[in-house]
Image (cartoon, rainbow, N blue to C red):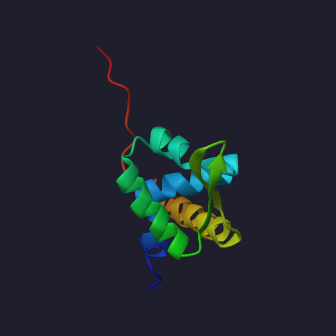
Amino acid sequence: MSEHPAAGLDETVHQRHRLGILTITAEAGQVDFGYLRRTLDMTAGNLSRHVTILDEAGLIDVEKGYEGKRPRTWISISPAGRKALAAELVALRALVAAVEGAVPAIRPRTT
């Protein structure tokens, strides 16, 4: 018996905030911490924790510096992060394909 498609999901990547960080940085390139915080509607502390997890896993690059006199943190997806995100998308597509026929289609309610 082959492994269920859910086994292909990566726990580090799949958590919704971390998946959000990876998809935003894959799409936009380098973004600042404040942009991610606002876009994902997260507290600074919560975002910081998820950024640390992704950084320690080598999935993002974090650059700290200044813009004028204001400290800034810029986040970008690393090559390993792009690979992990691509693998996650493959796993998600396989999961959707596996259940597509098993889950009844949701039909719009008519009133």
The reply to whether residue 14 is in sight is yes
Q: Residue at x 50, y 57 (%)?
A: 19
The answer to whether residue 99 of the structure is visible from this angle is no
Q: Is residue 96 above or below residue 58?
A: above
Image spot of residue 16 (x, y percent): 42, 55
**Residue 71 shown left or right of residue 79 in the figure:** left
Locate residue 55, reporting x and y percent: 54, 70
Closer-to-camera residue (60/1): 60
| 20 w.r.t. 61: above or below | above
Query: From this viewpoint, which residue is outermost toward the left?
Result: 111
Q: Residue at x 66, y 42 (%)?
A: 68
Q: Position of residue 81 (x, y in %)?
A: 62, 68
In this rendered view, identify the residue nearer to me: 108 or 69. 69
Total of numbered circles in the picture? 0
| Residue sitting at the far top | 111
Please provide percent x and percent y for residue 18.
Answer: 47, 59
> Compared with residue 58, is residue 63 higher up or lower down, i.e. above or below?
above
Quadrant of the snapshot with the C terminus: top left
In depth, the one of 108 and 44 nearer the eye is 44
Q: Based on the displayed image, in which of its 4 quarters is residue 63 positioned?
A: bottom right
**Residue farthest bottom in this picture:** 1
Most extreme residue toward the front is: 69
| Quadrant in which the N terminus appears | bottom left
Q: With 68 as the anchor, is 49 left or right in this view?
A: left
